[in-house]
């Protein structure tokens, strides 16, 4: 099962060792060539792991490709919402950003003035939010914030920003809060006709240790454990350059980690864990060669990635107008921008030179 004792085995070093064993298995058993070249590639966390396995096992892995990879552990990942806001303005509109800004700040003011029931009705919540409970309020705002952030990013299609912004800037709504509430209700209403924003219910689902539980099959309990003990990447509103107000702070995530995994989780442990991860693997400046880093210029995760060359054998490309993973598909003369096509061709040339330096293909 996925109790804490079992989850202690879920750590980056163990994952990298498993990848190394898999490479050896492929060479010995599947390919039958102990000297076969190995390229490890991944996107998101997989991009970080691909880079780190090259760092840990350079004698087994000849090259790595990190596509929109998460390379730097970040305790308070306030840059994510800032990066999302940049893309919302560029790919959506300034008016869209302004409407979201107003909606969230009006929502904050309603809580402060004792009119939380207005949000209960407008947002079609299954239960009222306790305005006196800081964690409950923070969780409520985190649900609103991540709902629009992750919705626009879910398919890696920049057009999602324009579609969402068109909905939110529709002239049919009297207020910005009404516009956001309409979009939110349309996208996230539950089967029973309302939207669940209960922190206690969320924690209860994450405390489920069965490996066959829905939340475990989705990997949410496992990933939260690694966030709490290695990576961070907690989205907050601590940056002033984002539209989501000020209520989502690290206190929420500390409470989340503590309540799900136990009293042994402390803010200091969480912070030191991200520092330790960066010390082990180099953070944004790893000492590595024969790795290529690609990122979309519109992807908020680029703030945890590598976006500039490290050395002549560890180069980086930032692709204009793209979100995460745009470079993973084959070249499409019809759909790809010229910049994206150039990056895909460069990838092919670089990895041919890394894998076959004395036998170019």
Image (cartoon, helix red, strand yellow):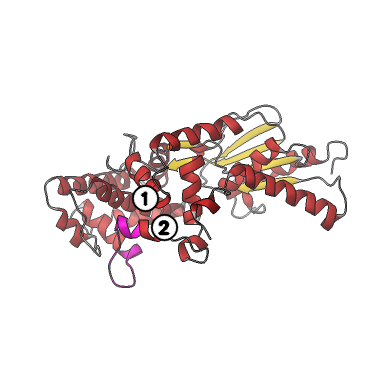
Residue 56 coordinates in the image, percent (x, y): 69, 37
Residue 357 appears left or right of 165: right
| Part of the protein shown in magenta | 186-202
User: Between 160 and 273, which is closer to the camera in this rendering?
Assistant: 273
Could one spot residue 137 in this view of the protein?
A: yes
Instruction: Estimate how packed mark 2 is, as few (under 14), some (14 to 19) or many (20 or more) residues with alpha carbons within 10 Å.
Output: some
Which residue appears farthest toward the bottom when viewing the image?
Answer: 192
Q: Please identify the quarter of the rendering in which residue 101 is found.
A: top left
Tag 2 residue: 207
Q: Which residue is mark 1?
A: 259
Asked if the residues shown at circle 2 and circle 1 are in contact, with their CB atoms under 8 angstroms apart, the answer is: yes
At x 44% / y 38%, what residue is drawn? 270
Labels in figure, total? 2
Which quadrant holds the C terminus?
top right
Is 123 or 156 nearer to us in this picture?
Answer: 123
Question: Left or right: where does residue 11 sit relative to residue 311?
Answer: left
Helix or strand or loop: what does disc 1 sit on? helix
Residue situated in front as seen by the camera: 165 or 236: 236
Q: CA distance from mark 2 to mark 1?
A: 8 Å
In the displayed structure, does residue 239 sit left or right of residue 157? left
Q: Is residue 277 magenta?
A: no
- Across and down, in percent, residue 10 comes to 57, 49
Q: Residues within 10 Å of mark 1 (few under 14, many from 20)?
A: some
Give the percent coordinates (x, y) of residue 73: 51, 37
- Point 77% across, 46% down: residue: 38
Please tell me which residue is depicted at 52% across the width and 66% down the height of the picture. 212
Which of the numbered marks, if any, corresponds to residue 165?
Answer: none
Please tell me whether mark 2 sits on a helix, a strand or a loop: loop
Provide residue 243's location: percent of width, then percent of height: 30, 42
Which callout, 2 or 1, points at the residue further toward the start of the chain? 2
């Amino acid at each position: 099962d996925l109790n804490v004792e079992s989850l202690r085995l879920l750590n980056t070093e163990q994952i990298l060792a498993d990848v190394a064993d898999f490479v050896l298995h492929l060479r010995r058993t599947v390919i039958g060539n102990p000297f076969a070249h190995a390229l490890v590639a991944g996107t998101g966390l997989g991009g970080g792991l691909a880079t780190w396995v090259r760092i840990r096992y350079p004698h087994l892995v000849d090259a790595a490709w990190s596509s929109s990879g998460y390379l730097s552990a970040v305790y308070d990942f306030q840059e994510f919402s800032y990066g999302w806001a940049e893309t919302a303005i560029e790919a959506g509109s300034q008016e869209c950003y302004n409407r979201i800004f107003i909606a969230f700040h009006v929502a904050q003011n309603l809580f402060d003035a004792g009119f939380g029931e207005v949000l209960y009705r407008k947002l079609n919540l299954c239960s009222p939010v306790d305005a006196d409970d800081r964690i409950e309020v923070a969780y409520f705002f985190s649900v609103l914030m991540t709902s629009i952030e992750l919705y626009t990013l879910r398919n890696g299609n920049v057009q999602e920003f324009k579609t969402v912004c068109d909905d939110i800037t529709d002239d049919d709504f009297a207020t910005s809060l009404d516009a956001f509430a309409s979009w939110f209700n349309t996208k996230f209403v539950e089967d029973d006709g309302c939207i669940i924003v209960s922190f206690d219910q969320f924690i209860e689902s994450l405390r489920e240790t069965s490996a066959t539980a829905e939340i475990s099959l989705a990997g949410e309990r496992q990933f939260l454990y690694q966030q709490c003990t290695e990576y961070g990447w907690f989205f907050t509103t601590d940056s002033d350059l984002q539209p989501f107000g000020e209520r989502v702070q690290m206190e929420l995530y500390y409470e989340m980690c503590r309540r799900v995994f136990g009293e042994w989780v402390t803010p200091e442990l969480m912070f030191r864990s991200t520092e330790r991860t960066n010390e082990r693997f180099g953070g944004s400046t790893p000492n590595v060669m024969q790795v290529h880093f690609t990122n979309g210029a519109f992807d908020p995760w680029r703030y945890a990635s590598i976006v500039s060359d490290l050395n002549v054998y560890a180069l980086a490309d930032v692709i204009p107008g793209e979100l995460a993973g745009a470079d993973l598909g084959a070249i499409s003369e019809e759909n790809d921008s010229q910049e994206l096509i150039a990056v895909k061709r460069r990838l092919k040339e670089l990895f041919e030179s890394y894998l076959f330096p004395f036998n170019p293909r």
